Image: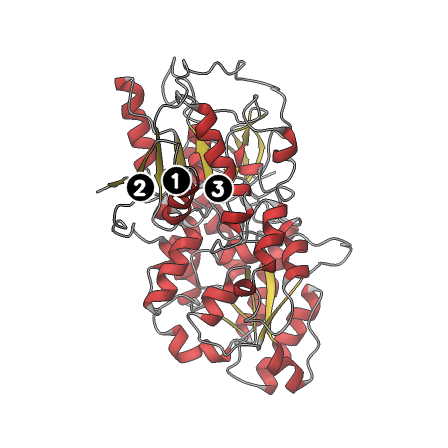
Amino acid sequence: MKTELSSGSRSPRRAPRPRAARTALAATALAAAAALLAGCGASADTTSGSAATSGHAQFTPAAQQAGSQITVWADSTRLPSVQAYQKAHPDVKMKIVTYDGGADGSTYLQTKVQLFDRTGSGWPDVVFGSPTDVTWASAPTKPGAIPFAAPLDQKLVPAATLDGFAKGSLAPCRFNGHTYCLRNDIAQVVLWYNKTLMDQWGYPVPTTWAQYQALGEKVAKEHPGYLVGSVGDTNSQESYFWSSQCPAFQETSPGTLRVALQDPNCTRMASLLDSLISAKAVSTQGFFSQGFAKDSGDKVLMAYGPSWYGQYLFKTAFKTPAKQMAAAAPLTWPGETTAATGNVGGGVWMVSAHSKNLAASTDLATWLTTSDANQAAAPTYPAYVPAAKAWLANPANRDYFAADVSGPFQQAADEVWTGWSNTKFSDATAWSSVVLPALTAGKTLTSTLPAWQSAISNEAKADGYQVTDK
């Protein structure tokens, strides 16, 4: 059920929580994870650039009605931001509707847009969604229809604004040479570590994957029970295999997906993790699984995971005392001078191509993603670089940590690998249904790679992709 609001109405019922948050952690941690993962999805730019290179003709807006009401669909986490815009812009007529925001791989928005395309009316003007939503919203839902999402680079959002987003963060928005959304937030992966324990035990912070593996094996021997990571959550592959530049979801051309899990970039990570799992330094039980916070939350020495881990995993779920946790930059492999890292979350804002008030709609989407007034107090790291600086300057986002996280966060934001592509299907399904049960049964990641590849390939083919393993 969707809740319609006008300015000043009561807060709506909370939208359904996404996959990683449906665990028995503290209720506050659950709500936080919902906020962070509601827009979770992969990102890759298969057709970079702002000029039309193929496919779509020049965008022709609907007949405009200046000052007309705009309808905004947002999830419950983003609702306060939309309401803040309404308060700051009282002359803008707005109808606010809450919905699931694409959480749990929901197809609610797509189904409703298909209905609106058939009836010829009803489209919302601005929507919050997941990167996966952009894969269908940037293409017609039926022959003769226009794509739901407006190409924002066609005289709607200035190029200077689009250029202000973190490197690669708009990749999920780009199709056929155009930009169909603005990225709200990113969840760049960094190395989290308990500085208090690392200092106490005399351990240096790893800068390479080899050092991470060696330290993990050392920790297992010298401090049994302590962990340097987990592969048991439904998004763990985004932290580890994405960071290894593993071509598990690599769209090499429109409609062609490379799924090559025997690639050295995949096998090196599987082998490293198998070693640490065998040593009991990396858990196959998820950080967000039943009972982990209570039983093992205080035994996590390091964790390779998203920027939101600090506040929402360690502070809220694990209740790690303040001034203990710190973040380090992404790790490198041999021969690399610049690291590549993954991304675990982040949503997008789209403006409807059917909007009769594109000026107000575009202004709202731009304000939500780029405004310091909104983003400095946002729950997660903004994709827009100037707003991210304001976010980092907010004491609420930095005072908990043992050291300044600004450097690692900013570096990692520009190092998210764009070869893990934004696909029509979730990258979590095959990992959850094939890999996690195999790990629970005692199998190695290396031995499970073929089954994982088959599951991804089958899912891709069902969604119309041509699949290659070369």
The numbered dot on residue 209 is: none
CB within 8 Å, label 2 to label 1: yes
Mark 1, mark 3: which one is toward the viewer? 1
> From the image, which quarter does the C terminus lie in?
top right
Image coords of residue 207 (percent x, y): 71, 66
Residue type of the residue flagged with mark 3? Leu
* Label 2 or label 1, whichever comes before in sequence order: 2
* Circle 3: element type: helix
CA separation in Å, label 2 and label 3: 17 Å
Image coords of residue 401 (percent x, y): 58, 71
Direction from residue 68 to residue 308 in the image, left or right: right
Q: Is residue 464 visible?
A: no
CB within 8 Å, label 2 to label 3: no
Residue 297, picture quadrant: bottom left
Tell me if mark 3 has few (under 14), some (14-19) or many (20+) residues whose alpha carbon lies within 10 angstroms of its own: many
> From the image, which quarter does the N terminus lie in?
top left
* 116 relative to 170, above or below: above
Residue sitting at x 68%, y 60%: 407
Direction from residue 300 to residue 130 in the image, left or right: left
The numbered dot on residue 368 is: 3
Residue 243, picture quadrant: bottom right
Mark 2, mark 3: which one is toward the viewer? 2
* Circle 2: element type: loop
Residue 459, picture quadrant: top left
* 446 relative to 285, above or below: above
Direction from residue 363 to residue 197 in the image, left or right: right
* Label 2 or label 3, whichever comes before in sequence order: 2
* Label 1 or label 3, whichever comes before in sequence order: 1
The numbered dot on residue 86 is: 1
| Residue on which the image places disc 2 | 7
Residue type of the residue flagged with mark 1? Gln
CA separation in Å, label 1 and label 3: 11 Å
